[in-house]
Image: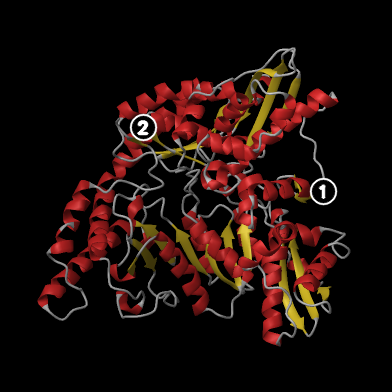
Amino acid sequence: MWEYTDKVRDHFFNPRNVGEIENADGVGEVGSLACGDALKLMFKLDKNGRIADAKFKTFGCASAIATSSVLTELIKGKTLDEAMNVTNKDIADYLGGLPEQKMHCSVMGREALEAAIANYRGGDVKKHELEGHVVCTCFGVTDVEIERVVRENDLTTVEQVTNYCKAGGGCGGCHGEIEKIIERIQGEKVGMHAPAVPRKGKKLTNIQKMQLIQQTINEQIRPALRAHGGNIELIDIEGDKVTVAFRGMCAQCHLAEFTMKDVVETKLREFVSEDIIVEEDKDSVEEGHVHKG
Amino acid sequence: MQTIYFDNNATTRVADEVFEVMQPYFCELYGNPSSMHTFGGQVGVRVREAREQVAALLGCHPTEVIFTSCGTESDSTAILGTLAAVPHRRKVITTRVEHPAVLTVCRDLENRGYHVIELGVDKQGRLDLDELGSLLDDDTAIVTIMAANNEAGTIFPIERIAEMVTERGITFHTDAVQIVGKVPLNLSETPIHLLSLSGHKLHAPKGVGVLYVRKGTRIAPFLLGGHQESGRRAGTENVPGIVGLGKACELAARYMDDENTRVRALRDKLESAILASCPDSRINGDPENRLPNTTNISFEYIEGEAILLMLDRFGICASSGSACTSGSLEPSHVLRAMGVPFTAAHGSIRYSLSRYNTEEEVDFTIEKMPQIIERLRELSPFVGQVGV
């Protein structure tokens, strides 16, 4: 059971400002049914350019509803520039804190606010526009968004990033990339945590190399393939030659040779050794089993 | 406030009769059953009696019952112990809807080079037995398929599966944690090799489980150490838990009819009333082959955790397959494997009853549900959009 503060419970059981505003000046929508939470925020300005009224509708858990309710309370009476300065941390602090795994709810509130202001300033855009390139394909989170939550909340681990913006919470295939973003921003702070995968060493024994190849496949490659109904099997390792077989959807893919093999090779070169060559074991492909659904 | 407990697939209350028989084994009869003195030996006699009580419920021989610490330990022992006993076989077959106690073990095996196949299920949560048949071969070490699903309540045709698998000389294990005590089993009439059960799902305490091992099944021990459980499971016996589980099994046999008549009727009443009073709700799972105590209902456009909190205010305990309740960001793997749309999976609620539930509790919940659903839908941005 989540430990919610009394304030969270109050704003969940008695949400303020639920509903829609006719002829709203700004409308922002973020999230989706598939993601598990979504927020539609609307506001109307008074003649001095201050937010006179704000209303919301939210699909989501108790903390998603409570953060939406608080957001509308926080921005009322503010100019748009002042409202832009409201961070996800302000929302969470107002509620007396949120469980760590629920911090993404407060980030969703801030995103909806930005989208609504952009809608007012820029015209038609109601949906939250994606800036930057998508890092987490499961939840559609970009590098710009990840950088922002890392900076604003001083995050140092992938797990924290997942709690704050969902990135990395699906198949796990982007954990390596998220780690690099954290490292770039936080520099030495990250050094205190052991990396998920040992970086390339100088000279590996054969046993160490085989273990590192297996570990890289298990942690860096398999999760992403699984998420798309596929799988990979390590068949053999001879010197720098790594033989693998693709299963399920991957084995069916006609482009397998140009895509999957290259992806695996790139990862193994990055994490194990520049000299790695990957070959696909064609003989075992026929055994490949296609999962249903 | 009175607690209305509809979360019996998560855990159950310990039966008063069970608690009573356990009590002497803490401060009075605390001896070690392995000891040579009479004081310990008398405890060993009670453990033996409990083994007979479990065997009676399962329809097996007492020597085929190994006491463990929980269902998870039974599952790990069954799978890893079998693989250790047949090291030349590298294939493991399971399903996508298993409990994590099985699924996580299988995925770890995959990382260690085993060929793991996870069978899919259809929209009702049913398996394709022809597909299973086509996958069985001489490389298959074990097939592990649950007897009944904890989330949707779907019952698999475990006897038929056991016949198909064992005919090919392959070990068959079933996680029967949810079915034992709810549906009669007679292991002497099936070829099932290994079966896991958990005490706290049938009104015994937490911390005790059983692995049934059919006579002649090749399996290596999982926990190593002393010679307890005929050398098949080391570790000093959890005597109070074992004595309690024995009593719980005896009671389960006695209440089996009640479970399948009165409890089933309560479940059916709750389910049909909710479906009738809450628009855009639907059952997840196979209504034909289902545990008598379980119903899993999806409510469109709203989220499960929010529903649970609203229920909690009325003292009603249930569970959800939504992402927010699992601590992960994705909804239940079981509902996704069944092809339940994400939208419905996020709004799913499981009610699981027991013989301790009453008609008043069901009526109270039936009365409260529509207002909870309506209130949350007023908050939802999707209700207007989709024309409800």
The lab-note entry on whether marks 1 and 2 share a chain reads no
Indicate the position of residue B289 as horizontal and vertical percent values: 48, 43
For disc 2, the marked residue is B315
**With B174 as the anchor, is A261 left or right in this view?**
right
Question: Which residue is farthest bottom?
Answer: A205
Please state which amino acid type lies under the numbered disc 1: His
Q: Nearer the viewer, residue B233 or B53?
A: B233
Along the viewing direction, whichever of B225 and B362 lies nearer the viewer: B225
For this view, does A273 lie left or right of residue B156?
A: right
Foreground of the two, A275 or A98: A98
Q: Chain of mark 1?
A: A
Q: Residues within 10 Å of mark 2 (few under 14, many from 20)?
A: some
Q: Residue at x 63, y 46 (%)?
A: A164
Q: Locate the N terminus of chain A by quadrant.
A: top left
The answer to whether residue B35 is left or right of residue B298 is: left
Callout 2: SS: loop
Query: Can residue B212 be seen from the camera position used here?
Result: yes
Q: Amino acid at mark 2?
A: Gly
Residue B246 sits above or below residue A242 on the image: above
| Left or right of residue A48: residue B219 | left
Distance from Cα at disc 1 to Cα at disc 2: 46 Å
Callout in the foreground (1, 2): 1
Q: Residue at x 75, y 59 (%)?
A: A184
Check disc 1: other Cα within 10 Å, few if <14, some if 14-19, many if 20+: few
Q: Which mark is residue A133?
A: 1
Q: Residue B191, how many percent across, how many down?
A: 44, 64
